[in-house]
Image (tube, helix red, strand yellow):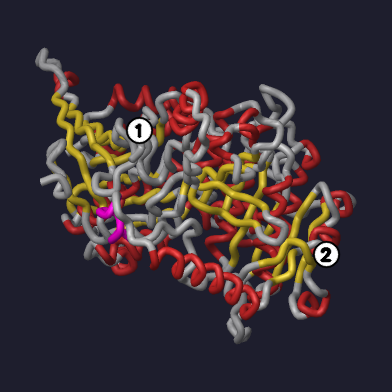
Amino acid sequence: LVFTEEDKYGLYSNLLFKYFLAEGVVCGHDLFVASAKEHPDHILKELPAPLLDDTYRNELGEEATAVKSEDFQDSMKIAWRYQNLPKMEASPTTSTKFGHYYDVSKTMSPELFQSVKWHSFYLHEELSLQPKMKTCNMNSAYARLLQSIQRIIYQEGFDGSDPQKKQKNILRIGIQSLGSMLWGDDICSSDTPEDINSLTKFLYVLRGLLRKSLSACIITVPAHLIQNKAIMERVTNLSDTVVGLESFIGSERETNPLYKDYHGLVHVHQIPRLNSLICDVSDTKDLAFRLKRKLFTIERLHLPPDLSDTVSRASKQDLAESAKLLSSGCGAMAIGKKHLDF
Amino acid sequence: QGKFTLLRDTRTDGSFLVHHFLSFYLRAGCKVCFVALLQSFSHYNIVAQKLGVNLTAAKERGQLVFLEGLKSCLDLLFGEEEEQSGQPSPLQFISESASNLKALFDFVRTSLTPAGSDSWKGPVLLVDDLSVLLSLGATPVAVLDFIHYCRVAVCSQLKGNIVVLVHSNEDSEDEENELVVNSLCHHSDLILWVEGLATGFCKDVHGQIKIIRRVSLELTAEQDHVQIYQYKIQDKNVTFFARGLSAAVL
């Protein structure tokens, strides 16, 4: 269960959401899209087009070889101790091929889409039907969504209930903007909501459904609107992976020279610890994302080289201050009280 | 015998302790009732196999009573009417408006009360984790009542042990959770408090564990014994060492 905290204007989390669904199309998984905001048909029409392996790998290959040939010539003279260290990889997955890359400027072609079976849940169309399950004090919109998901899982055999079904497939569920007012939940608008447990109950039941079947789910939530922080803590507890996106639009960080190459930060609050005692923590905790014309990339946040001629003391101070504010780590591994992560 | 152990974690995941206690008590031959609210059975099974215990076999010979919260909740909500002819679901409080954990307590009591043919050593109740009950709509008072009833039944009457995991955060805004955790701390005989290092994330030392033996409860005018160790979690094992003496440093 991947839980994504939306950035303030929802631009980038929407992108991540579409990536998840697009990956499902390319891998041939079934899709289930639920939204109260946009009609799922529209969402699905706007999925990014996958980049064919050859073209992208060539591009990437060219860049890499270009860099290598340059560096080969000048060996380091002053900092010669550093020469033997491997070059830092800005993007964590250049060598391993996991998943696909997408071109954000183009939309996915309809032919690719036809081969995939997809189901949708658009809240305003479903309001007319009565839920058959016991609502157990949950928000009725959530109850209907759960019932719909459960019905699809059962009918399509994702939970192994149909032993004759030979081909096992995975269901990718995407739920957009859960918890917002469009779903009838008032946790985003008031400090003391009517039913504080609706969202957490929903997540618990959803977790049960996911564990019982071959499915994966991404949820985006406008976390910045939720007034009651206790809910966010409980929700983090109930999810497997929690990722927060913080975009720089409209905030003071936009003009900060530390962040000038990037469009936002990625906070990984929790990673799953399933089926083992330990979890796989990456070396770095500071991740930032940027949206180029064609690509959306997530990279390690690194300070730009300090090459300006007129370096004043004041600006250096700023950089140091903002470097201290970098992420405080994620919750599956221990995080500290002070900002002294190594 | 008759001890209440509280596992508490702050800013990190203390579930490795739950896995440890589960395999420990099963190997010792105790009858275990495991209320697993957060993860599925197969997760615990796979980890237990790495630690050398087979949960499926334990279930079959009656040594382990496993309540899989997620599955139980689904059966409650999506189940057909005919299936619920027998006992009421232990998680009934989710669908009822009265937040009363009595059904859950009854389940625990019936599973740990020794039947005539049982030859297990003392009963053990293991809960992972209690904070989920609050998320599902139980009030803090109901949760504390449940624990109290369990203590009376398991610790006093059946002379068994209870181990419970809760989450807590220092600057937590979740008042209900903090209320439950603080109250449980006062009543526990042993507290294992797992925390992150104060200096931040470290690859070789995953955190520190504080062991608090509540000797003060025994009215001998002694203070609680507190011991602090640091630990590192590996695939099949957890190594503990004194502070500052991690293998990476030595």
Residue B50 drawn at (x, y percent):
26, 65
- Residue assigned mark 1: A340
The mark found on residue B135 in the picture is none
C-alpha distance separating marks 2 and 1: 45 Å
Chain label for disc 2: A
- At mark 2, the secondary structure is helix
The mark total stands at: 2
Q: Is residue A145 magenta?
A: no
Q: In this view, does A240 lie to the left or right of A254?
A: left
Observer-nearest of A12 and A330: A12
Classed neighbour count for the residue bearing mark 1: other residues with Cα under 10 Å, few (<14), some (14–19), many (≥20)? some
Which residue occupies 59% across, 32% down? A256
- At mark 1, the secondary structure is loop
Can the viewer see residue A269? no
Residue B88 drawn at (x, y percent):
54, 49
Which residue occupies 49% across, 30% down? A319
Start and end of the magenta stretch? A79-85
Q: Is residue A82 magenta?
A: yes
Observer-nearest of A157 and B235: B235
Q: Is residue A67 left or right of residue A29?
A: left
Q: Is residue B140 left or right of residue A229?
A: left
Q: From what the image shows, is residue A93 above or below residue A16?
A: below
Q: From what the image shows, is residue A108 above or below residue A33?
A: below
Observer-nearest of A210 and A98: A98
Q: In this view, does A49 lie to the left or right of B217?
A: right
* Amino acid on which the number 1 mark rests in the picture: Leu
Chain label for disc 1: A
Q: Quadrant of residue B40?
A: bottom left
- Residue assigned mark 2: A45
Q: Tell me whether marks 2 and 1 sit on the same chain.
A: yes
